[in-house]
Amino acid sequence: MSKSEVIQNLLDELNNQNQIYIAIIGTILAVLGLAFTIFSFMQRRFSDKQIQKMEDDFKKDFEIEERKVDFQELTEAVHGTLDIVSRVTNELEKSTKVEKELQKQIVSAMNSNLESKASLLEAISVLSDLSIINNRLEGLNNTLADVKDRVVPKTLDTVLVLTTNGMMRIKENITKRDVKLTDKAIEYMNSIEHQFNEVVENTLKTDTDPKLKNSIKVANQDLITKISNVIS
């Protein structure tokens, strides 16, 4: 056998041995890979179960499920309460509107009554006796005392003019009949003047239209003059 053939045989033998070694190593690697895969799967499965167990234990220790139910019940109760509060609020708003409307109607009625009393005073004639004069002065005085905090500017202006005209009628009456007013009538007149002064003073401090304010001021001064003429 030649030298080259011997070398070739040796190379073939080494190649065969390398193939065997490679096959053995590949088998070992495959087995190790399979083992690692199985181990990883088992570890993951164990971890999931362990996490679930920890979660269940935590819920059990702290009664989370029961607390969740309690919180839901509390939330429903709060929503129910808020709904009741909302309905009550709506009813209160309606009640407030009704109350404001009633107050408005009351004020209107009181102002109308005041204007009516002033009109009766203006209707005094030369034929009216002192008792009628006293009664009408008393009616105006008492009504003004009840409504003076609620007299609206326009009504005030009208009532001042009516009352002034009434004082002129009283003056004409006692002059033509040559009689004197009773002390009670004079007391009513002084009270009426005082109350009107108070109402006018408060009205002039409000945001009433300037022209109406001026008219009220002038009418009140005119009334003061007429009352003074009647009493003197």
Image (spheres, rainbow, N blue to C red):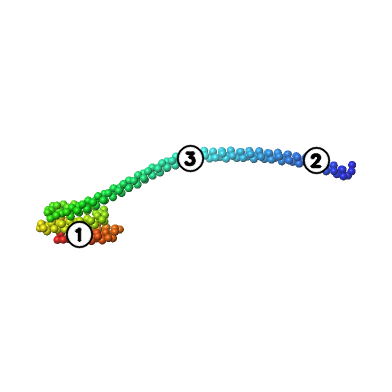
Where residue 2 sits: x, y (%)? Answer: 89, 43
Q: Are marks 1 and 2 in contact (CB under 8 Å)?
A: no
Q: Position of residue 40 (x, y in %)?
A: 64, 40
Mark found first going from the N terminus, 1 or 2 = 2
Amino acid at the residue labelled 1: Leu
The quadrant of the picture occupied by the C terminus is: bottom left
Q: Which residue is mark 3?
A: 68
Looking at the image, which residue is at 40% across and 44% down?
82
Q: CA distance from mark 3 to mark 2?
A: 72 Å
Mark 2 neighbour density, 10 Å: few (under 14) some (14–19) many (20 or more): few
54 with respect to 222 (left or right): right
Disc 1 or 3, which lies upstream in sequence?
3
Position above or below: 166 against 28 = below
Residue contact at pointers 1 and 3, CB within 8 angstroms: no
Q: Is residue 102 something one can see in this rendering? A: yes
Residue at (38% x, 44% y) in the render: 86
Q: Nearer the viewer, mark 3 or mark 2?
A: 2
Q: Which residue is mark 1?
A: 223
Judged left or right of residue 51, residue 36 is right
Q: Quadrant of residue 187?
A: bottom left
